[in-house]
Amino acid sequence: MRIYVNELIKAFCKKTTIGIFVALTVLNGVLLWVNDNQKSEFYTATQYKAMYADFEGMTADEAYEKISEKAVKLRLFEDMSFGMDITDELKEYPNIDAEQLMQEYKRSYLQYTNNEFAEQELTNDILKEVEACAKYDEYLQNIDDTAKKMTSISLFAEPDTFSYKNIEKTPGDFAHLKGSKLTPAPSKGIQQATGFLATDLIGLLMIMTVVVTIVTREKELDQILLSRTTFKGRTHLGIAKLFTCFTAAFVAEVMLYAVNFTVSYFRYGFGDLSRQLQSVYDFNGSNLKITVLEYIGLFLLAKLIVYCVISGLIYLVTVISNTAIKVYGILGVTLALEAVLYYTIQSASYLSPIKYVNIIAYANTEDLFAEYLNLNMFGTPVNYKFVFVISAAVLLTAFSIISVLIYGKQKVIKSRTKRISLEKLNIFKGRSTSLFLQECYKIFIGGKALFILIAFAVFTYASYEPMSESFANADEVYYKQYMLRWEGELTDKKISEIKAESKKFGKAQNDMQEELASTEGDGLFVMMKYQEILAPQMAFEQVKEHAKYLSHTENGEFVYDSGYQLLTGGESAENKDKTLAITAMAMLICCLTYVYSIEYQTGASVLLNTSKRGRYDIFLYKFGIGAIIVTAVFLLTYAPYFYNVLSAYGTRGINAPAYSMEHLKQFGMSIKGYLIIISASRFIALLNAMLIIYFLSKKLKSLVATLLASTTVLVLPLLLSLLGIEVFDWVLLDPIILGNV
């Protein structure tokens, strides 16, 4: 127990640990608030709560009837605002008095918001939530009906298949919910408090901060040698460290979710906590008959188990790794592999257990309670909740036992076995007093930067797949044909051709409508007759809109831009810029964290202070070597992608003005110039990232602390941007490294 207490003091009483935990907790709250404000809703949380307050005390049926009437009235008010006659529509709603409706229209009919569109959005969203409560019995009945229909279809009627067994099992798992009376109440508060994925990303960093402090940091300072001479060796110490990791998981969960629940409560409220879980809109498909309060308790328990599994995994990785870089690399590869498995495997696949017995799936703990899901376990449907409990218990036990055993038996005295000597190579023969060469050796060989870059280059080469020009549909083929046909500046001749093309499609449409009107039957043969003529119309309309845009530019040109869209942040590029930026930043952290940290770890920094121009010259050499590494990382990250895209789509029109593409309308340079500018800005961003890593390593004086801090400052904002939190497109180096925001 005393060892455990000492480990707790070591882990949690450091200023850096306290500062990181507090900063990440505040960051979590800010992100939760900002993310909610960025959603596309046109109404506020206050307006959402105010509308629900007016239905308080009503049954689901009463609330549904009242809000349905309000939704109908809003639709009628909209028609009236456009001067439309609503007499016929009113006949469909005999319960609405026309005179009273007119009086409401003359008065201000906006009860909760300040514009009609926002009022409709608010009403429709709450109507959707209330309807799910009012029609819950119909939902359950639909499950039964669907199961009967699907088991009678030949595709699913094989009794030995997973699909048949799953469909047959579902009605029975929902049978105990029949007759449930759901109470409508605000749903967004519960959903926001328990469904914010960025919280778990921050929790991972908090846990990692503690684990690497009590394991990896001790290995760096060779303090672990002392524990070998203690009574009972290192086994008890390993157990104490393991429970310290679990304590870190508990503290992280308490701090983060205290913020989540507080923010969500004051923003949206939770409603009646004793109501059934299915009354929360996102949990309507759950088969658990529990209250909202019971869900919160089970969620926090499940989340604690998930955090303990994560802490056990990190602890195991730190135990088997003798450097922080190895910890960073193994965890990065593991999480990347888990993400690929989670997002690529289908839920009904025979590989679904791999998809859901997965750290990423565990992090989406809300889904465990919100969804009804059976996994395909050798053709038998097994409920995911059962699989989660068993798999989490097995993983937690395995990580714990293996890590403690390895920690207790681990050799800590480095063997002096003969290794490959670099002095056998001519370049390393003899001794040199060159400060530059000494720094090169220290960084590239001692810091493993050379091997990391070689491994990165090998991975880049092995994973490179030549891109081929692809078309998602026929419209993209026609779009290319039109853009190449009218390539170049928009001239009067091209305008005439565009008008003629437009008339051709208009005439074809009119002719088809006339033939359809005079033809008996479904007119299928008529439509087939005009299909070939009208097939390019959708693509032409896109080109026509682009021509209108070019007409308002100075010397704008038609450019087949599918390839350039990928390189300049167009819609088709999706998140490629962000994934490349994360890759580049991660590689820089792996290569450069060692550069200054090792000086303080070995005490060599003291010598630099006593020598003439010591720190000045050493900085210049470190900067130069860092710039070489930055250049290598930059080229290995971005050059293959640029080459791949330009090889596939060509460079036609590369000298056209950048504003020839709508999303670059503010740039007056050529497309080639723009590509050079964003490439230069990314290189400058990586140089700045190098300086940030140097600064952090000088201030923190620890390899592992620098590794964590650099990840938080340089990688975390990009990850949050990748998750869709748009404010992080503009944080720190993100706007420079992304280039296209």
Image: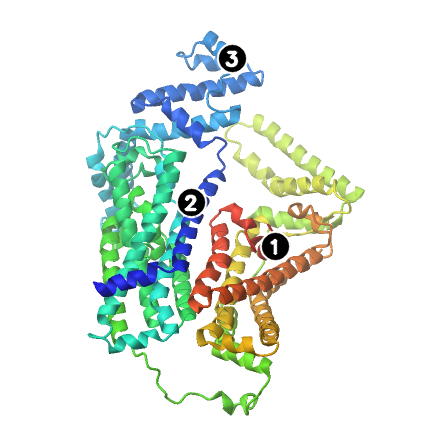
Tell me whether the residue at label 1 lies in contact with that at label 3, contact meaning CB atoms closer than 8 angstroms: no
Give how far across and how far down residue 337 sits, in percent. Answer: 40, 62
Quadrant hosting residue 398: bottom left
Q: Is residue 357 visible?
A: no
| Colour convention of the picture | rainbow
Q: Is residue 286 visible?
A: yes
Query: Residue at point 55% right, 50% down?
Result: 729
Where residue 326 appears, as percent x and y from the top left, is: 41, 70
Query: Extreme front residue here?
Result: 610
Circle 1: is it few (<14), some (14-19), or many (20+) Cα within 10 Å?
many
Q: Amino acid at mark 1?
A: Gly
Instruction: Find residue 370 and report its horizontal and vertical position in percent.
Output: 31, 42
Tag on residue 393?
none
Q: Which mark is residue 29?
A: 2
For this orientation, the residue located farthest to the right is 492
The crowding category of the residue bearing disc 3, from other C-alpha atoms within 10 Å (few below 14, some 14 to 19, many at least 20), is few
Q: Residue at x 50, y 54 (%)?
A: 718
Q: Tell me the CA gap for discs 1 and 3.
A: 50 Å
Taking 254 as reference, is 86 left or right?
right
Residue 129 spot, x, y in % from top left: 37, 30
Question: SS of the residue at dot 1?
Answer: loop
User: Could you say whether the residue bearing mark 2 is in a helix, strand or loop?
Assistant: helix
Which numbered disc, 3 or 2, marks the residue closer to the eye? Answer: 2
How far apart are labels 3 and 2 at the CA level?
41 Å
> Which residue was labeled with disc 3?
107
Residue at which label 1 appears: 739
- Residues at badges 1 and 2 in contact (C-beta under 8 Å)? no
- The amino acid type, in three-letter code, at marker 2 is Gly
Within-10-Å neighbours for mark 2: few <14, some 14–19, many 20+: many
> Amino acid type of disc 3?
Arg
Compared to residue 563, the image places residue 607 above or below, namely below
